[in-house]
Image (spheres, grey):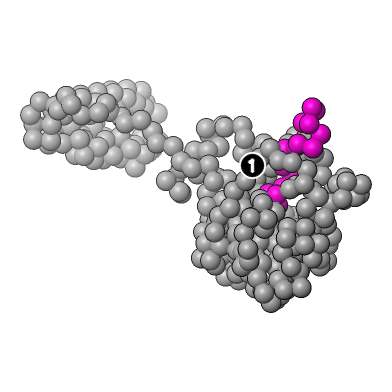
Amino acid sequence: MIEKIKSIRAELEAVAPANLDEVEALRIKYLSKKGLISSLMNDFRSVPAEHKRELGQAINELKSFATDRINSLRETLADKGADGDAADLSRPASPAPALGTRHPLSLVREEILGIFHRLGYTIADGPEIEDDWHVFESLNFPPDHPARDMQDTFFIARRPDVLLRTHTSSVQTRVMTSQKPPIRIVCPGRVYRNEAISARAHCFFHQVEALYIDKNVTYADLRQTLLYMARELFGEHTQIRLRPSYFPFTEPSAEMDISCNICGGKGCAFCKGTGWVEILGCGMVDPNVLEACGIDPKVYSGFALGMGIERITNLKYRVNDLRLFSENDVRFLDEFTATHS
């Protein structure tokens, strides 16, 4: 083994790499976990006890020499250009600053918008500070309607008719009062509700809602849109089911489940053994909403659907704590760099 150590040292003394790539190849050859020096350490285990001290010292000296030699070669070549000339002082500093990535919520938001864009929907936007009519009354929430208790709202103290929107449905009413059908829009945005912050809830979150109004729009149109969207998001074998529900602004209303994308619908801890996971609410636009926005419900019909972007992101990336999305922990955000940069 002593002769092998001497041979490796002689090789290192003689090497003359031409560029930094060759230096890296030398590092891998001699110092990596599967390199020549590591193989010596593996052979060292079978050395008789009386020789271990001598050989152990020799291997350590070789490793130190190899490290110093490769570092020296790297520094020498780093001070020269690829052709051996002096370095180009106009080049940016090395290493270059690390590039960031888009936020996981932004990635999912853009994916959802892309799906609806392919279906012919356009993006509509509206203010986060809204009035009561656009957020509640126009959507079939009369002032004394018990459905207002479904959402804990942030009202402005000096203006009780002004509030932070609790859903992006307010964008839909703005479009319906300013445009004539056919209307086919998707409304992304941030919304606010007065809830205690925990792993499962936050005082603000993000939604995407879609609205389609035209002549002869049916529940079958809604279901096919939902099925297409679910399979684009979670895979071509995804199944959906619609369960009756209640929302003041749609009739009939439903909540949509997808077959669990973790167990494939067989049942697991994530879907609580049911094989299904809820992702959104939907329904046919209530005629009262159309009438309030100046659209004749005898001529036009439509459907609406809405989902939380955090909920979809949880399902796609299995993020179990909503607080991670707003804490700006670089370690969490870096997990999305390699895949989506």
- Residue 263 in the image: x percent, y percent? 67, 62
Mark 1 — residue?
A: 127
User: Measured along the vertical axis of the image, is residue 262 above or below residue 308?
Assistant: below
Asked if residue 164 lies in the magenta stretch, the reply is yes
Label 1 Cα crowd, 10 Å radius (few <14 / some 14-19 / many 20+)? few
- Residue 311 in the image: x percent, y percent? 67, 50
Q: In front here: 149 or 201?
A: 149
Say which amino acid is labelled 1. Pro
The quarter of the rendered structure image containing the N terminus is top left
Point 12% across, 35% down: residue: 82
- Residue 51 as seen in the image, left or right of residue 234: left
- Residue 35 as seen in the image, left or right of residue 232: left
Point 30% across, 34% down: residue: 31
Q: Secondary structure at mark 1?
A: loop
Point 21% across, 39% down: residue: 21
Count of residue discs: 1
User: Measured along the vertical axis of the image, is residue 141 above or below residue 224?
Assistant: above
Write down the region rendered in magenta: 156-170
Q: In front here: 6 or 51?
A: 6
- Residue 20 in the image: x percent, y percent? 20, 35
